[in-house]
Image (tube, rainbow, N blue to C red):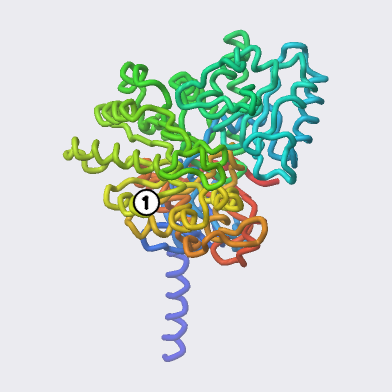
Amino acid sequence: MKRLAHGTFVLLAIFALILSGCENTASTVDDPADLVLLNGKIVTVDEKETEAQALAVKGDKIVAVGTDEEIQKYVGPETEKIDLEGRLAIPGFNEGHGHFMGIGNAKMILDLTTPKNWDEIVAMVGEAAKKAKPGEWITGRGWHQDKWDKKPEPAVEGLPVHDKLSEVSPDNPVILTHASGHGSFANAKAMELANIDSSTKDPAGGEILRDAEGNPTGFVRETAQGLVSSANIGPATDEERDANMREAAELAAKEVLENGITTFHDAGSSYGVVEFLRKLVDEGKMPVRLWMMIRDSNENHEKNLASTRVIGHGNNMLTVRAIKLSIDGALGSRGAWLLEPYSDAPELSGLNLIPIESAKKTAELAVANDYQLCIHAIGDRANREVLDIFEEAYKANEDKKDLRWRIEHAQHLHPDDIPRFGKLGVIASMQGVHCTSDGTWVPDRLGDKRSEEGAYVWQKLMQSGALVTNGTDAPVEDVSPIASYYSTVSRKLNDGSVFYPDQKMSRMEALRSYTINVAKSGFEEEIKGSLEPGKLADIVVLSKDILTVPEDEIPSTEVLYTIVGGKIAYRKQ
């Protein structure tokens, strides 16, 4: 009898297992997942910082996160399976501040990030001039005088003069944009077409750099760039312009997806560009999610803000709900607006690019039309002025409790202003890679004391209660989130030194700054930024675990998969 009882027990157990298997099979038949990720380390970046092995996707959303065993029940005959082989999967990177069309456009002109000095740039332009038709514009972007291996001779403010450039391109106008985008260098032909000579007055918010005799050197700072760019009319016909923009958008999307970015915060485009990108979304030709800031005149805002605002257009591929302004320039070109003069140029304190009253008017329009206001401010004077504008607007609209206005860059702050970010609820939309890219020369511009007190002070801002986000400002820097993440956790400069290490982020803080924090900065935390059931299935799979590998291995990490809305948008071959 004992043997019979034992045998009966075994049979019942087997029968129960069979029934369990049938139930799982029925579940997968009834409602199988379209995609499952198995056998990995999935860091969800939710409030509990949950780790899992696997997740399941149905349509464009995550339906389950858990163990391999738990997710197996979502596997049906048609389910696509990705074996992560133990690798890290995280929410898709959210680029917090970049220039989408600028990335594509930069790939269609001379890449000036690689030349080591001014002479190499001149040689590059000379080769381009040999191939160009007379009168054809030669354009390039990416040079930075503080990163050259030797100083140009002759020079004004450490910047070259145009003579050598003009000699190699006498029949072609040339405009070469600084890496920051806040200055450009023109040759004689370009200045001739722009009517720039010794008698030309500086425009408001800009400067034509001159030599000791008052002659233009070729460098135009901030708004003065418009004098030259307006002379370059670009493609002649609507068809050519459309083709040019489509190529730039395609190149940008490809670059962004290859770097694991699933949402891109575009930091300032005109109404025309916004409409063009909306058209691409409607055509199904935009594979990355765009969150856009409009950069245009107050006059155009009054006419167009209300009709342009969209949230989650095209199945969450396009959101337009922010306005972009630039209150000052960049530190590298000495256009950042400072409370005290530059340490390496005592005659300069930077530039205010737009009247404060105009910015206040924009703030009124933003509130009236339910737009976020995102203002570029790099210098400590610029940041203080913007905080004042925000505080005044908040007090005038006390019924608006959650505006989430942003300061883009917030690179150099006066110690007195750091607590104001947290107190006011102002988002610091920053770029980790700027710290290490600029760190070698920031003390030259600001001096050691100002640099330590207020330059790229991520921890101080977070301790104030402010939300800090991450990005690259591409094409100012490479669009790689891995590179910016590494800068954020290491603050390591090219010479091996560390830029004020007490302001480093932890690895999880840095990951949040590139995912859920950016989502929050755009009112999108309910649909993206973490890997949770019900949220969009925007996922990136990495070759290395950037949360645990030795720090110096982080930069060699590769993106293996970029998944947007449950679809594999990029797969490393």
The residue tagged with tag 1: helix, strand or loop?
loop
> In the image, residue 218 lies at what x, y percent?
65, 25
Split into 4 quadrants, where in the image is the N terminus?
bottom left
**Is 24 placed left or right of 149 in the picture?**
left
**Which kind of residue does numbered mark 1 sit on?**
Leu
Residue sitting at the far bottom? 2
- Rendered image quadrant of residue 458: bottom left
Residue drawn at (37%, 41%) of the image: 406
> In the image, residue 482 lies at what x, y percent?
59, 52
Residue sitting at the far top? 237
Q: Is residue 225 something that shows in the picture?
A: yes
**Is 548 placed left or right of 303 in the picture?**
right
> In the image, residue 82 lies at what x, y percent?
59, 53
Name the one closer to the observer, 207 or 412.
Answer: 207
Vertical placement of residue 480 versus 155, above or below: below
Q: Name the residue under label 1.
A: 467
Residue drawn at (60%, 64%) of the image: 551
Q: Is residue 81 something that shows in the picture?
A: no
Name the one closer to the observer, 1 or 250.
Answer: 250
Residue drawn at (40%, 32%) of the image: 319
- Rendered image quadrant of residue 328: top left
Please tell me how crowded label 1 is: few (under 14), some (14-19), or many (20+) other residues with Cα within 10 Å.
many
Residue drawn at (77%, 13%) of the image: 133
